[in-house]
Image (cartoon, rainbow, N blue to C red):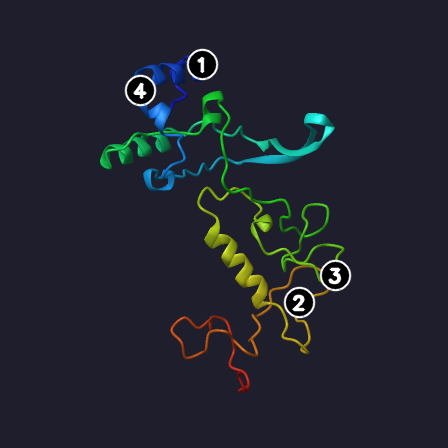
Amino acid sequence: LMTDGDHGLPRWLVFVGAALRHPLPLLFSPLPWRWSERTMISLVMQSRDNSLTLVRRRGLFGRCRLTSTRGHGQPNPTWIPAGNDATRRIAKHVDGFPGGTLPEVLDIPMTAHILGGAPIGDSPANGVIDPYHRIFGYDGLHVVDGAAVAANLGVNPSLTITALAERAISLWPNKGEPDQRPPAGSRYKRIPPVRPLYPVVPEHAPAAYTVGLSKGPERRRD
């Protein structure tokens, strides 16, 4: 059951009150039967300058497990008022019932997109990869996924990750051609994108990638 965090009471107590007022939704909402047909999930992004840190801790029987703890920056919000308000409006519109996640009752927020971990930097002292997504100290190894994102975006990261990957791949040399990128460890230098030998999308197609590409010699395409 959805609970807010501004009642001046412990949140678990607010949850108990909601459970007493709405026992049927509490009992039936977790049931797995046709759950995906009965449920609509709303995601809300927070834009504070904060972070999570992954740590290893001993669990049951001495086994190590990976968990997260607060990193630098502002504390992670335990609830987002605009998100709760939007969810309640959606529920009213579709004749549903607003809900939340169980950890929220204990003021433990949930994240759907863990970013960073291998951010871009100008040296190994402040980053894991260089501006061309090459890992410092490991020639030939690149990171082009969400780990390269260096800050909290405050929005869904899919398009940002796609843009970073597209840019990184556009600077890779074709097989057998010289690498335009400066040697690893050098200062950043802006270079033009490389024209692919066999582009997946033909140049005459509406979605062809031609921005920044200079006209080169015609090449046979398979």
Amino acid tagged 3: Asp
Mark 4 or mark 1: name the one nearer the start of the chain.
1
Which sits earlier in the primary sequence, circle 2 or circle 4? 4
In space, the residues marked 4 and 3 are separated at their CA atoms by 59 Å
In this view of the protein, which residue sits in the foreground, 106 or 214? 106
Marks 2/4: CA–CA distance: 62 Å
- SS for callout 2: loop
- Which disc, if any, is residue 26? none
Q: Which numbered disc, 1 or 2, marks the residue closer to the eye? A: 1
Alpha-carbon distance for marks 1 and 2?
56 Å
**Alpha carbon of mark 4 to alpha carbon of mark 1: how far?**
19 Å
Read off the residue under disc 2. Answer: 181
Residue at which label 1 appears:
10
The residue mark sitting in front, 2 or 3, is 3
Nearer the camera: disc 2 or disc 4: 4
Query: Mark 2 to mark 3: distance in Å?
Result: 13 Å
Task: Classify the position of the N terminus by image quarter.
Answer: top left
Residue 120 lies left or right of residue 23; in this view the side is: right
What's under tag 1, amino acid-wise?
Answer: Pro
Q: Which residue is mark 4?
A: 22
- Dot 4 amino acid type: His
Q: Nearer the viewer, mark 4 or mark 1?
A: 4
The residue labelled by disc 3 is 139
Classed neighbour count for the residue bearing mark 4: other residues with Cα under 10 Å, few (<14), some (14–19), many (≥20): few
Above or below for 64 versus 208: above
* Residue 64 locus on image (x, y percent): 71, 32
Decide: few, some or many residues near mark 3? Use Cα within 10 Å; few <14, some 14-19, many ≥20. Answer: few
Q: Residue at x 50, y 74 (%)?
A: 200
Disc 4 versus disc 3: nearer the observer? 4
The percent position of residue 25, horizontal first and vertical second, equals 33, 25
Q: Earlier in the sequence, mark 4 or mark 3?
A: 4
